[in-house]
Image (cartoon, rainbow, N blue to C red):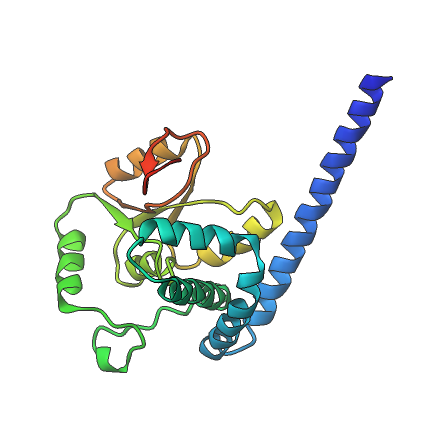
Amino acid sequence: MSHLVLRTKLRLRNAAKALGDAAVGALTIAMLRTTRFFDPFKTANRFGRALRWIGPRLREDRIGRENLRAAFPEKSPQEIETILAGVWDNLGRIGAEFAHLDHIWDYDINCPEKSRVEIPQRTHELFAQLKNDGKPALIFASHLGNWELPALAAVAHGLDAAILFRRPNSQSADRAIERIRAVKMGTLIPAGREAPLKLAEALQKGQHVAMLVDQYLTNGVEVTFFGRKT
């Protein structure tokens, strides 16, 4: 009898997970499609304001505050709150920009003064060196601003790149996001056990491999980070 109860509970839990995944995926697809009808920059402003209001009511707000205190012990509570509000604002803006990834990169090398993206001269020099030296390279991007932009920049300006990315937990949401990412992001390699081999193959082919540097892994090695074990 106990085995039957356990099997029933497991089936119900799996069914609930499948329904939840489908709901999240449908909501994600609906939001992405709807957002594409509106101006990306005005929508980003609205989403930023919305997340500034919603964010402080979420559990992640407390986690973010604790992490900021650990990272910046010298900062006052007011400074911490200012940074945290900026984090929520940025996440809201990225939510709006994500639906427009296939055309949001706005930089004309011939008319930089008319472009929305600003690129220092030194960055131009380093990019040209990476592109023209005939060698593969590893590129590490920070999880700042809109972290999707470096991958867009590579393809937009002719750099053959393979991009490591983490799939969303929702399969249907993942499919919708992958279709958007694949338009102008080069070779996409999902994080997982096979990722290191695929990244090595990309380097052997002469591609440039890019990745973010702050992904948390539950099966990674234990380290001390800001005085705490993680």
Q: Eyeballing the image, is 173 above or below 109?
A: above
Position in image of residue 174 (x %, y %) = 55, 49
Task: Locate residue 129 relative to residue 148 in the image: left or right.
Answer: left
Q: Eyeballing the image, is 228 above or below 114?
A: above
Position in image of residue 113 (x %, y %) = 23, 81
Q: Nearer the viewer, residue 220 or 133?
A: 220
Quadrant in the picture for the C terminus: top left
Q: Residue at x 78, y 30 (%)?
A: 9
Position in image of residue 138 (x %, y %) = 24, 44
Q: Residue at x 69, y 53 (%)?
A: 23
Quadrant in the picture for the N terminus: top right
Q: Eyeballing the image, is 127 above or below 9?
A: below
Position in image of residue 199 (x %, y %) = 32, 37
Q: Residue at x 44, y 29 (%)?
A: 219
Residue 159 appearing in the image: yes
Q: Residue at x 47, y 76 (%)?
A: 45
Residue 204: image quadrant is: top left
Task: Locate residue 64 relative to residue 143 in the image: left or right.
Answer: right
